[in-house]
Amino acid sequence: MKRRCDDRPDESPELLEYLRSLGQRSLIVGVGNALRGDDGFGPELAARLAGNARCPAIDGGESPEDCGPQVLAARPDKLLFADAVAFGGAPGELVLLAPDQLGDKVAVTTHNLPLVMFLKYLRQQLPRTDIRILGVQPRQIDPGKGLSPEVARTVRALKELLAAGCPRDRTDKPHLRGEGAQDKTRNGSTT
């Protein structure tokens, strides 16, 4: 089930419903390298959400496994990893994946331990936790560059959406894709 949204979130209700369902018993972990362009999506999102969202957010950086003890101690109902994932969408577009869907996309990674391995461990340790990956399609992951305008716009829109007490109707909405985007992979990699 492919869904694409060009400033109309009603075309991806599953993703918006999931994001709006995040609360205090949820945890967002930003994953990536802030010094490699759009790979900094996760850390930037975590930084913007820290203390300003309906749910806690932490920066897992390039080694999200280092925050494993913190994740296990939190025992969240919902655990969302925010990362750059090359799934073939437009730059800045989002996709919500289950951990087993990410495995098809991992060929190249900038993380010290492939995220899919860490997710497998967490699924064993937290069997009742709903674990998902919020992937953004990167434009570039060049060293020394900041976020592309498209990914920066997506981060701003997500902050508004996840901010405590934010209005539901906004004008700056991210490009969204539903959960079945794995069949449109360009190069099968995650950053």
Image (cartoon, rainbow, N blue to C red):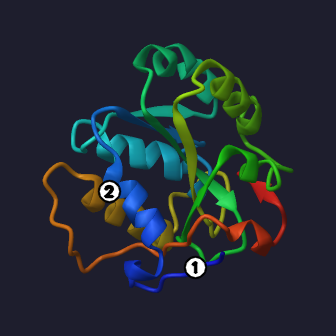
Pointers 1 and 2 in contact (C-beta within 8 Å): no
Residue 120: x %, y % from top left: 73, 30
Q: Residue at x 36, y 60 (%)?
A: 158
Q: Is residue 152 visible?
A: no
Q: Secondary structure at mark 1?
A: loop
Q: CA distance from mark 1 to mark 2?
A: 18 Å
Q: Residue at x 78, y 71 (%)?
A: 183
Of 91 and 171, which appears nearest the observer? 171
Q: Secondary structure at mark 2?
A: helix
User: Along the horizontal axis of the image, is 56 left or right of 15?
Assistant: left
Q: Residue at x 30, y 76 (%)?
A: 172
Question: Which numbered circle lies on residue 151?
Answer: none
Of 101 and 48, which appears nearest the observer? 101
The residue that mark 2 highlights is: 20
Residue 35: x %, y % from top left: 57, 46
Question: Which numbered circle lies on residue 3?
Answer: 1
Q: Residue at x 32, y 34 (%)?
A: 56
Residue kind at label 2, given as amino acid type:
Arg
Mark 1 or mark 2: name the one nearer the start of the chain.
1
Task: Using the image, determine if residue 174 lies above or below residue 23.
Answer: below
Task: Using the image, determine if residue 91 lies above or below residue 106.
Answer: below
Query: What is the total number of numbered labels drawn onto the structure image?
Result: 2
Crowdedness of circle 1 by 10 Å Cα count: few (<14), some, many (20+)?
some
Crowdedness of circle 2 by 10 Å Cα count: few (<14), some, many (20+)?
some
Task: Using the image, determine if residue 132 lies above or below residue 11.
Answer: above
Residue kind at label 1, given as amino acid type:
Arg
Q: Is residue 25 visible?
A: yes
Residue 80: x %, y % from top left: 49, 42
Q: Quadrant of residue 118?
A: top right
Residue 133: x %, y % from top left: 58, 49
The N terminus sits in image quarter:
bottom right
